[in-house]
Image (tube, grey):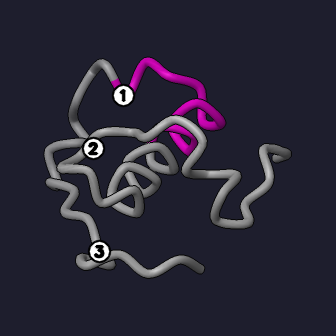
Amino acid sequence: MSQSSMPWVKIYTEILDDPRVGNLTESAQLRYIQLIILAGECDAEGALVRGHYERHGHSRSG
C-alpha cells in the first residue's frame, strides 16, 4: 500500500440515492468506488495521475 498525505477519502451518503451511480451495474459501481480511492491515493487534489497505479505496485487485473 502506498502512503499519501491523506490516507482516506470522503464519500457522501447521497451516493446511495444518486441515479447516475444506481444505474451502473454492481461491477461498475465497485470500479467507480475504486477510482475514487485511487484518486485519493494519487494525492493530486482528486485527480487521477497516469501511471501512478503501476508505479506503486498495483496490477490492472481484476
> x and y percent of residue 60 in the render?
78, 44
Disc 1: which residue: 21
Between tags 2 and 3, which lies in front? 3
Quadrant position of residue 23: top left
Residue at (22%, 29%) from the top-left corner? 18
Q: Is mark 2 in CB contact (under 8 Å) with mark 1? A: yes
Between tags 1 and 3, which lies in front? 3
Disc 2: which residue: 16
Q: How far apart are marks 2 and 3 (CA)?
A: 19 Å
Against 31, is 44 above or below?
A: below
Against 59, is 27 above or below?
A: above
Quadrant position of residue 20: top left
Q: How crowded is mark 3: few (under 14 residues within 10 Å), some or many (20 or more)?
A: few
> x and y percent of residue 17 in the render?
22, 36
Q: Give the range drawn in magenta.
A: 21-32
Judged by its main secondary structure, the magenta piece is helix
Could you tell which of marks 2 and 1 lies nearer the N-terminus?
Answer: 2
The type of residue carrying mark 2 is Leu
- Which mark, residue 8? 3
